Image (spheres, rainbow, N blue to C red):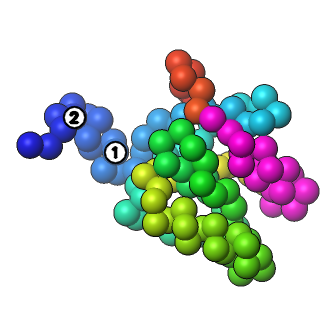
Amino acid sequence: MGQMVPVFDRDVMAEGMARPVNWRGRSGRYYALAPERLEDFSFVGDELHLIALGPMVLWVGAAVDLVSDPVSRARFRLAMDCADRVFHVEARADEVERLTIIWDLEAAEPSMGLNAA
């Protein structure tokens, strides 16, 4: 028998509008990550994504990383084989900021008890 989920929560999850959750990067900075359905995950433009298995980050990056970096591509394939969640990461187009966020989130952990508003 499937897990019982309140109708509103089930509808919100089905629509892909789940509330953002906070993850803390290695620098101590908090990020409000938007959960996405793993089954529906796809890259759009240069958007950053975090792929995880429970609280463990498996891969952080964007489509451009898959094209330009063979190591990132290999890590992404492995991550997609065992991940159970994916998050959209809000970031500007600035390359330095993007790489800094990737570095910070590669060692991130979920912040229990804190929810993004």
- Kindly tell me whether residue 18 is visible in this rendering: yes
State the residue at coordinates (77%, 76%).
69
Label 2: which secondary element = loop
Q: Which residue is disc 1 drawn over?
A: 13
Ranked by sequence position, the earlier of labels 1 and 2 is 2
Question: Which mark is drawn over residue 110?
Answer: none
Q: Which of 48/107 is in front?
A: 107
Q: In which quarter of the view is residue 8 placed?
A: top left
Q: Which of 20/107 is in front?
A: 107
Q: Which residue is disc 2 drawn over?
A: 5
Q: Which residues are magenta?
A: 93-109
Q: In which quarter of the view is residue 70 placed?
A: bottom right
Label 1: which secondary element = helix
Q: Which amino acid type corresponds to the residue marked 2 in the rendered image?
A: Val
- Kindly tell me whether residue 88 is visible in this rendering: no
By secondary structure, the bulk of the magenta-drawn segment is best described as helix
State the residue at coordinates (91%, 56%).
96
Kindly check if marks 1 and 2 are in contact, taking CB atoms under 8 A apart as contact.
yes
Residue 57, x across and y down, in percent: 61, 48
State the residue at coordinates (54%, 23%).
112
Residue 28, x across and y down, in percent: 78, 29
Instruction: Please determine whether, in this image, residue 53 is positioned above or below residue 110.
Output: below
Q: Which amino acid type corresponds to the residue marked 1 in the rendered image?
A: Met
Tell me the distance, in whole angstroms, between the alpha carbons under discs 1 and 2: 10 Å
Find the residue positioned furthest to the top: 113
Q: Quadrant of the N terminus?
A: top left
Instruction: Please determine whether, in this image, residue 26 is positioned above or below residue 16.
Output: above
Find the residue positioned furthest to the left: 1
